[in-house]
Amino acid sequence: MGTHFRKNWSPPINDDATYRVDLTSWASVTSEATTARRLLTNRTAATALRLVEEIHAGAQQAMDASPNQGKHACHKGCPGCCHSMISVTAPEACAIAEWLRDNKRPEEVAAIRQHASENAAKGASLNRTAYAESMLWCPLLDSQLSCTTYDVRPLTCRAWNSLSLDACHDCYFSNHVNKKIPLDDHTHAIGQGIRSGLSAGIKGMGLDGQHYELNSALIVALDEPDAADRWIRGDEVFEQCHSA
């Protein structure tokens, strides 16, 4: 990425009480503008995947500027949050599916698809709290609870950074509904803004910018190899998926 890109995704950082609000607003505006600019180009499946790559790269740069970067407690195999309901936009689901097809054996993809199908069926009628209580592990985890698609993980996951491993373990091994995980406010605010801006930018271009529950969206993206192409042409490819 060039100098102009790095400048665009350098977040404003200050010490006053409006920091979080300003950061979320900045991220939303930046994300929406980036999305609109990308979707004004030739609309192909490659454009949709490139949009996700660009938004994720910008999000990561902005999140890496967090003053709490060295305090993140998240690590591979932590059981803390990967059974929570995860939301994705249609192009994010397509990017994950494309990555799986390019990097995993067919039988591995089939196993992930089966896991996602089971989760979607069990979680269809659950709200966020009940979903987390049901311990429906993300289908993209391996046997060691590590993310197998880390490079293309959703914005929701990128933005969730705990500052206390003890709090995560306490939350997981006890009644997590009544526990509060201390989060990195910087990355969380960035994530909220970028997700909002991405959705708004997509909708502003007349496309489906809904946030969907990961399992149901991933099933569609895996079952329909041309999902990205159809989505960017305006088809309601994901209309039967669960909202999140």
Image (spheres, rainbow, N blue to C red):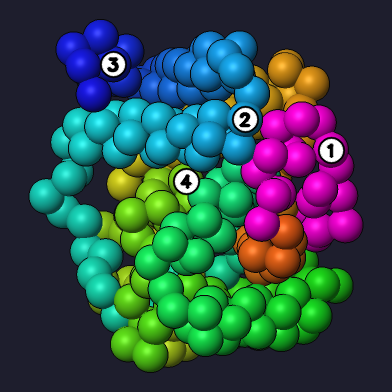
* Classed neighbour count for the residue bearing mark 4: other residues with Cα under 10 Å, few (<14), some (14–19), many (≥20): many
Q: Which residue is mark 1?
A: 235
* Classed neighbour count for the residue bearing mark 2: other residues with Cα under 10 Å, few (<14), some (14–19), many (≥20): some
Q: Which residue is mark 2?
A: 44
x then y, percent, for residue 201: 64, 21
Amino acid under label 2? Thr
Cα–Cα span, label 4 and label 3: 19 Å
Element assignment for label 2: loop
The disc at residue 155 is 4
Query: Can residue 208 be seen from the camera position used here?
Result: yes
Q: Please tell me in which quadrant of the rendered image residue 224 appears.
A: bottom right
Q: Please tell me in which quadrant of the rendered image residue 181 appears.
A: bottom left
Q: Nearer the viewer, mark 3 or mark 1?
A: 1
* Classed neighbour count for the residue bearing mark 1: other residues with Cα under 10 Å, few (<14), some (14–19), many (≥20): some
Is label 3 in contact with label 1 (beta carbons under 8 Å)? Answer: no
Side of 218 where 58 appears, left or right: left
104 in relation to 198, above or below: below
Cα–Cα span, label 1 and label 2: 13 Å
Quadrant (top left/top right/bottom left/bottom right) for the N terminus: top left
Q: Earlier in the sequence, mark 2 or mark 3?
A: 3
Q: Nearer the viewer, mark 4 or mark 3?
A: 3
**Residue 228 among those drawn in magenta:** yes
Side of 170 where 30 appears, left or right: right
Element assignment for label 3: helix
Is label 2 in contact with label 3 (beta carbons under 8 Å)? Answer: no
Q: Nearer the viewer, mark 1 or mark 2?
A: 2
x then y, percent, for residue 50: 46, 33
Amino acid under label 1? Asp
Write the residue at 41% across / 53% down: 152
Is label 4 in contact with label 3 (beta carbons under 8 Å)? Answer: no
Q: Which residue is mark 3?
A: 5
